C-alpha cells in the first residue's frame, strides 16, 4: 500500500498505534487543514474527542496556498447601511476628536514638546533667579510701609474702629439709649482687646530680648529675613507688583459665545433678540480660536466680510487677528479664526532651502507658513504665477525663494531677467541658461534684445515639445504629457524650464520692443506650462498700462503682497477676489513677505514666505551650480554659450544677401524673414513663426549689432499705398564689406 504524500509521518509510538488502529477498523483518517494563521486544525470526529494534531504541507503549485500570511484575517462581507444613515455615520466619524492628542502619538513631537517645556521653564526660572537680589531690595524698602500698615491695623482693632459708623448713626438719630448701649459694648470690647494687645506686646518683647541674647547668629539672621519679608510683603503698593512677569502678556482671553454674539450684534449682522447660532462649539485652534456661526436668514458671508473691522472691534482685537473663511455648506454660515496675537507680524523664519542638499521640482517644496503656523508647500508645475505688491514689501524675496528651489533641482532650466537691474538676482548667473539685467545696453549686450531672443528661442522650443510629445508612444509619454523621466533625459532635451522676470513692467513699457515682449510672454504664459515651462512675472505696477490684462489673465496662480487698495488687490488676484474675502490692502507695512495666494491649489489663503537673504541666496546658488556641474546640466549663459554659435551668427548678412535679389534695392522685413526661413528653416523657422510686426522686430534686433537699421518702404498694393518697415540692400553690402575688411588674413 503506498503512502499518502500529504501526511507527515512521525516516529513516536502513539502516532504509529493510532495509524494501526485506524487501519484495523478499516476507517479512513481525516486530514487536518491549514488555518489562516498557519496552524493545523484539530481532527475531531463527531462521536469521539480529538486525540492529537497533524501538520501538512500544502504543495507549492496549489493556487490556494499563495498569499497565505500568518495573522491575515479572512475578508468579511461589507455591511451596507441606508444612504442617509451612512452619510450621518461618516460625518460623525470625521467630526470625532482623537482620544489621544496627535502630538502624544508622535515620538518626534513628544520630544519637541518636552524640549520646549524644559527650555521654557528653565528660562522662567533663570529670569527670576537673577532678580532675587532686586526682589529682596524691594521687600526691604517696603518693610517700613508694611510695619506702619500693620501698626495702624492693630490700633484700629484695639480701638474697635469698625463700630464707629454705627455709633455715629445713633448720634445722628439722637437715640441716646441706643448710643449708651453701643458705648458700653465698645468699652468692654476695647478693654479686652487692650489687655490682649498688652500681653502680646510683653510676650513678644520678652521673646525678642531672649532671642537677641541667647539665639545664634544664623537664627537672628533668619528671623530678620522672615520679619523683613513679612512686613515688606504687607507694604507692597497695589500698583507695583514685586515679581516681574517672565513672559510678554498679550491681550488675549478665552473666546466665549457671549463675546462672539456681542461682536456680531455690534457689527449689525444680527439683533439682540435674534443672536447667532453656533452649529459647532468654539474650540482652540493653534494660537487662537476657531468659531463657526450661522447668521440670521437673509444675511450672507458677503455681509460679514464687509463688517470685518466691526467684528474685530466687537471682539476687541486688531482686524489683522480676525480671519473669515467661506463655508460651502451654507451661504449664511461663517467660519472665523481669531488669533491671540497678530500672526502676520511674526516672521516665518529662514527658508529650509538654506540647508537643503537638492530639490525635486516635480514635488511641492516649502515656501512659507500660513497664519496658523502650518507649513505651505507649493509647486510651479503646469502653471504661471503673477506676483504683485507695492515696493519694499518682500515681493522680490518671495519670488526669489521659488527660483532658488528651481535652482536646487539640477534638471530645471532657468531663464532669469530683472527689469530694475538690482543685486537681488545677480548670483543666478551661476546657474541660469539665459539671464539679463535692466534695459540699458552694457558691455556690448542689450538686455532687452537678449530677452527677446531668449523668449523667441523658448517659444520655438515649446512648439517643438508639443510636436515631439504627441508623437511619442503612450508607454513613454502617457496622455502626451511630460514626465519626470522624459524631463531628465538629456537626449530628449525637454527639461522643466522656469522663466522668471522681475519688474516685468520695465520690459513691457519699452518704447520700441514692449509689444514684442508682451506677445511672447502672453504666448508662453498661456501655452508653455502644459509642456513643463513655467512663467513667473512680478511687478509693482499691475495696472493695464504697465502690465496689461491680456498678460495678467494668462496666469493661473496669483500672489499679492500689500497693495494700496482693494481694487489693486483685485487686479493682481483676479476680478471677484474681494468678494471672496481676499483683500491684500488689509495687510500692514509691518507684514513683510506676507501675501494672499490664489490659484495654486483649490484653497486660497495667506502665506508668510520664508526668508533667504542675499548671503543665503549666494550659498544656495553656489551649491546649485556644483550640483549642475556634477550632473552636466549647466548650459547657456552660465557657461558662456550664446543662443547660436558665432559662425552661424556671422552668416546672417550672407544669408540676407543670398535671399535678396540683386535687382531689389529695398525689401520689407517680413518678406526677408520668410525668405530666410525657406533658406535655412532650422535657424530662421522660429522667426517666420512670429506674426505681424514681430517678424520685422526680430530682423531689426538681429541687424542692430551690425549697425544696420530699418526704414519705411512704401509700395502700392491693389492700387493702394502701403508702407512697412524694411531693409536696404546697400546697407547689407556695406556691412559685409566692412566685416571682411576687419577679418584677419588667412
Image (spheres, rainbow, N blue to C red):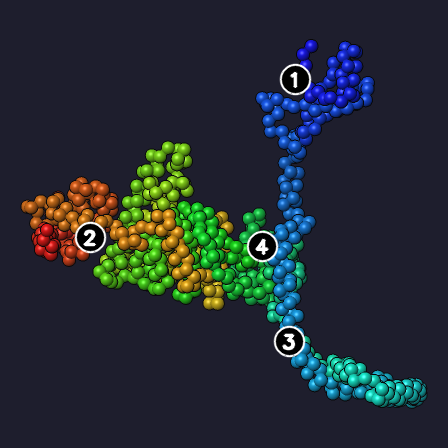
Q: Position of residue 62 (x, y in %)?
A: 60, 22
> Do the CB atoms of the residues marked 3 and 1 lie less than 8 Å apart?
no
- Nearest to N terminus: mark 1 or mark 2: 1
Q: Which residue is mark 4?
A: 335
Whole-angstrom CA distance, mark 4 to mark 3, is: 46 Å
Q: Position of residue 514 (x, y in %)?
A: 27, 56
Whole-angstrom CA distance, mark 4 to mark 2, is: 58 Å
- Nearest to N terminus: mark 4 or mark 2: 4
Residue mark closest to the camera, 1 vs 2: 1
Q: Which residue is mark 2?
A: 702
Q: Residue at x 12, y 44 (%)?
A: 659
Residue mark closest to the camera, 3 vs 1: 1
Q: Which residue is mark 3?
A: 130
Tag 2 secondary structure: helix
Q: Residue at x 61, y 22 (%)?
A: 59
Q: Quadrant of residue 206?
A: bottom right
Q: Which mark is residue 5?
A: 1
Q: Residue at x 71, y 84 (%)?
A: 140
Amino acid at each position: 500500500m503506498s503512502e499518502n504524500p500529504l501526511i507527515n509521518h512521525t516516529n513516536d509510538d502513539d502516532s504509529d498505534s493510532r495509524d494501526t488502529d485506524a487501519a484495523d477498523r478499516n476507517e479512513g483518517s481525516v486530514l487536518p487543514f491549514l488555518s489562516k494563521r498557519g496552524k493545523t486544525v484539530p481532527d475531531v470526529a463527531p462521536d469521539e474527542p480529538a486525540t492529537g494534531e497533524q501538520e501538512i504541507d500544502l504543495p507549492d503549485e496549489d493556487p490556494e496556498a499563495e498569499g497565505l500570511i500568518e495573522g491575515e484575517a479572512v475578508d468579511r462581507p461589507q455591511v451596507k447601511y441606508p444612504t442617509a444613515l451612512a452619510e450621518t455615520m461618516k460625518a460623525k466619524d470625521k467630526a470625532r476628536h482623537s482620544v489621544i492628542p496627535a502630538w502624544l502619538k508622535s515620538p518626534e513631537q513628544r520630544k519637541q514638546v518636552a524640549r520646549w517645556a524644559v527650555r521654557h521653564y528653565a528660562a522662567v526660572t533663570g529670569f527670576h533667579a537673577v532678580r532675587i537680589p532686586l526682589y529682596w531690595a524691594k521687600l526691604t524698602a517696603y518693610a517700613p510701609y508694611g510695619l506702619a500698615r500693620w501698626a495702624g491695623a492693630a490700633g484700629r482693632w484695639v480701638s474697635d474702629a469698625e463700630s464707629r459708623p454705627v455709633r455715629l448713626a445713633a448720634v445722628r438719630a439722637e437715640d441716646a439709649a441706643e448710643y449708651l448701649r453701643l458705648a458700653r459694648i465698645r468699652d468692654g470690647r476695647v478693654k479686652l482687646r487692650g489687655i490682649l494687645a498688652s500681653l502680646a506686646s510683653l510676650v513678644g518683647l520678652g521673646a525678642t530680648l531672649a532671642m537677641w541674647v541667647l539665639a545664634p547668629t544664623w537664627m537672628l539672621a533668619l528671623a530678620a529675613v522672615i520679619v523683613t519679608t513679612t512686613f515688606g510683603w504687607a507694604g507692597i503698593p497695589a500698583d507695583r507688583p514685586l515679581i516681574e512677569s517672565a513672559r510678554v502678556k498679550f491681550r488675549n482671553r478665552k473666546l466665549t459665545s457671549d463675546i462672539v454674539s456681542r461682536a456680531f450684534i455690534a457689527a449689525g449682522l444680527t439683533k439682540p433678540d435674534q443672536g447667532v447660532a453656533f452649529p459647532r462649539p468654539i474650540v482652540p485652534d493653534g494660537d487662537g480660536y476657531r468659531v463657526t456661526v450661522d447668521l440670521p436668514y437673509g444675511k450672507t458671508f458677503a455681509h460679514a466680510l464687509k463688517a470685518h473691522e466691526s467684528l474685530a472691534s466687537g471682539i476687541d482685537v486688531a482686524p489683522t487677528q480676525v480671519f473669515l473663511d467661506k463655508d460651502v455648506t451654507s451661504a449664511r454660515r461663517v467660519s472665523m479664526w481669531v488669533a491671540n496675537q497678530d500672526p502676520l507680524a511674526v516672521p516665518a523664519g529662514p527658508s529650509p532651502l538654506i540647508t537643503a542638499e537638492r530639490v525635486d521640482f516635480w514635488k511641492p517644496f516649502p515656501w512659507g507658513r500660513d497664519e496658523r503656523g502650518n507649513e505651505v508647500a507649493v509647486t510651479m508645475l503646469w502653471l504661471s504665477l503673477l506676483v504683485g505688491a507695492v515696493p519694499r514689501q518682500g515681493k522680490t524675496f518671495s519670488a526669489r525663494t521659488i527660483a532658488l528651489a528651481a535652482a536646487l533641482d539640477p534638471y530645471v532650466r532657468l531663464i532669469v531677467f530683472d527689469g530694475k537691474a538690482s543685486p537681488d538676482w545677480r548670483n543666478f548667473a551661476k546657474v541660469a541658461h539665459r539671464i539679463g539685467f535692466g534695459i540699458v545696453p552694457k558691455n556690448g549686450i542689450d538686455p532687452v534684445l537678449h530677452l527677446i531672443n531668449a523668449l523667441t528661442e523658448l517659444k520655438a522650443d515649446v512648439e517643438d515639445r508639443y510636436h515631439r510629445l504627441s508623437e511619442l508612444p503612450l508607454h513613454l509619454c502617457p496622455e502626451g504629457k511630460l514626465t519626470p523621466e522624459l524631463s531628465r533625459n538629456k537626449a530628449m532635451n525637454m527639461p522643466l524650464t522656469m522663466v522668471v522676470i522681475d519688474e516685468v513692467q520695465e520690459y513691457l513699457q519699452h518704447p520700441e520692443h514692449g509689444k514684442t515682449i508682451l506677445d511672447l510672454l502672453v504666448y508662453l504664459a498661456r501655452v508653455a506650462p502644459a509642456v513643463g515651462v513655467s512663467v513667473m512675472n512680478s511687478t509693482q505696477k499691475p495696472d493695464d498700462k504697465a502690465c496689461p490684462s491680456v498678460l495678467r489673465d494668462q496666469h493661473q496662480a496669483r500672489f499679492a503682497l500689500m497693495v494700496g487698495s482693494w481694487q489693486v488687490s483685485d487686479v493682481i488676484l483676479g476680478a471677484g477676489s474681494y468678494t471672496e474675502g481676499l483683500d491684500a490692502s488689509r495687510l500692514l507695512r509691518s507684514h513683510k513677505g506676507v501675501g494672499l495666494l490664489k490659484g495654486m491649489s483649490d484653497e486660497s489663503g495667506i502665506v508668510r514666505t520664508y526668508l533667504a537673504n542675499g548671503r543665503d541666496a549666494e550659498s544656495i546658488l553656489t551649491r546649485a551650480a556644483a550640483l549642475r556641474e556634477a550632473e552636466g546640466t549647466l548650459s547657456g549663459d552660465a557657461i558662456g554659450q550664446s543662443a547660436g554659435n558665432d559662425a552661424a551668427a556671422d552668416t546672417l548678412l550672407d544669408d540676407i544677401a543670398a535671399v535678396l535679389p540683386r535687382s531689389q534695392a529695398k525689401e520689407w522685413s517680413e518678406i526677408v524673414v520668410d525668405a530666410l526661413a525657406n533658406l535655412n528653416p532650422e535657424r530662421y523657422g522660429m522667426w517666420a513663426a512670429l506674426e505681424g510686426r514681430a517678424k520685422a522686430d526680430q530682423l531689426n534686433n538681429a541687424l542692430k549689432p551690425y549697425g544696420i537699421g530699418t526704414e519705411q518702404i512704401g509700395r502700392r498694393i491693389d492700387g493702394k499705398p502701403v508702407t512697412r518697415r524694411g531693409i536696404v540692400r546697400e546697407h547689407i553690402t556695406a556691412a559685409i564689406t566692412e566685416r571682411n575688411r576687419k577679418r584677419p588674413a588667412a
